[in-house]
Image: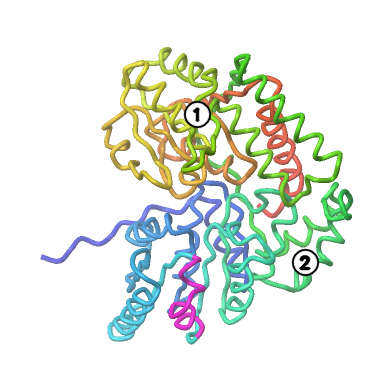
Amino acid sequence: MSAPAKTTPALWAHQDRAIEFALERSATLLYMGLGTGKSRCAIEVARRSGAKRILILCPLSVCDAWSDQFAKFGPEATIAILNKGAVKSKAKRAAEADSRAWAYSHPLVVVVNYESARAGAMANYIGQHHWDLLVIDESHRAKSPSGTTSRWLSRIAPKCARRLALTGTPMPHSPLDVYAQFRALDPSIFGWSFVKFRRRYAVMGGFQGKQVQSFQNLDQLQERMGRITYQASRDVLDLPEAIHERRVVDLGAKAQRMYREMETDFCTRVREGEVTAANALVKLLRLQQMTSGRVTVETETHAELVQVDDAKQKALADIFTDLPADEPVVVFGRFRADLAAVHAAAEATGRESLELSGSRRELGEWQQGVAPVLAVQIQSGGTGIDLTRAAYCVYLSTGFSLGDYEQSLARVHRPGQDRTVFYFHILARGTVDEQVYGALRKRKQVVEAILDGITR
């Protein structure tokens, strides 16, 4: 008996428009919100354009997702998912898949993470072949103009007949983030010089005139982006409501004293010119870590994480207490201190907890219902995962990246979610927490002002 034919769900209207937009151009940025079906669009572009050799570059955690997408939506193809093993081994497996695709007259699809793609044998393999379609998934990951990945992309992309970048956050930090992405797609849009690009769209000042003070000519930036950008926001999705609530806590006397001493020292060093853009971030991170209630103490033999306050931990425990014991909850944080606070609050309220971080990968167990609470390090859990089991999400800290923050929000509030989503932001009063939260909101407004109205 032959296998039943695969039934492919119909495309959404915005996907049809995005595909037609991309097919009319050799280079396209699909600026589409999380859950709007960017990867389905890329697969359909490959099908309709008759692409025989397809290279997909993406973060390591997203490689397997492409296998699932091709299984659901793709044409019959030979697919090499290169997310395990050494670079040399990946290059060998790609070459073997290449031979199989040729033997069976199948399209070849190679999926590999950015770091491996630009290294050694893998880079040689990619550079020696013609590619009909290059898909740059989560293209904002290659936003640094001087970064190794973005410079390699700018060399390899022109050799690909069609380039397609996918992202839901093209400007995770500022409007300047788009330069390297467009350099890879079509350098005629913004040119080959980042210095000239920055001079046109940013107002510089501050220490040695090297800090961005504000932005300018944003209408022109929007117009040029729009030449090859298709936008579909998450508004096209029929999602349940999302509600945000701030929970402001007061640090205890000891933590307040330590925080103020560190803050005063920071401000003094700024005035005296000892703190520059290069080292300010490190010092701000230490201030933010302090609000999580734990500080790193260096000894002669090791570094130890010491708890100096539990205000945020208690606020988190209060949230847990107000919910049924088996209610799934995702808690995001930037620091190990945040993750420790999640586990302590869960234990104090009689709950089991799991973790998704650089050292623990327990997402699968949480999705299967092994425990209700999942502590997530925001850099590890922002991309390529589904957290829709939970309708409650808590932030103990967010970091300074608008991209990481937006990605994490959309892991809970996305297709598959059928309940109202509640986001709780726990902030320490009068600290850098409030400043970071406010800065993310302001940065979001700047980004939205540019992106809103680009081709829909």
In the rendered image, the vertical position of residue 207 relative to residue 259, given as above or below: below
Q: Quick one: 215 or 397, which is closer to the camera?
A: 397
Magenta stretch: residue 126 in it? yes
**Quarter of the figure with residue 244:** top right
- Residue 85 is situated, as x and y percent measured from the top left of the image, at 34, 68
Residue at which label 1 appears: 306
Q: Please give the name of the residue rendered at 76% of the width and 43% of the height, measured from the top-left corner.
A: 446
Residue at which label 2 appears: 194
What kind of residue is marked 2?
A: Phe
Quarter of the image where the N terminus is located: bottom left
Residue 422 left/right relative to 219:
left
Mark 1, secondary structure of its residue: strand
**Quarter of the figure with residue 78:** bottom left
Q: Quick one: 187 or 315, which is closer to the camera?
A: 315
- Residue 450 is situated, as x and y percent measured from the top left of the image, at 76, 49
Residue 409 appearing in the image: no
What kind of residue is marked 1?
A: Val
What is the C-alpha distance between the residues marked 2 and 1? 43 Å
Sooner in the amino-acid sequence: mark 2 or mark 1: 2
* Count of residue discs: 2
Q: Please give the name of the residue rendered at 63% of the width and 44% of the height, measured from the top-left corner.
A: 401
Q: Quick one: 103 or 456, which is closer to the camera?
A: 103
Which stretch appears magenta? Answer: 114-127
- Residue 386 is situated, as x and y percent measured from the top left of the image, at 41, 42
- Residue 59 is situated, as x and y percent measured from the top left of the image, at 48, 58
In the rendered image, the vertical position of residue 128 relative to residue 369, given as above or below: below
Q: Which mark is residue 28?
A: none
Which is in the foreground here, disc 2 or disc 1? 1
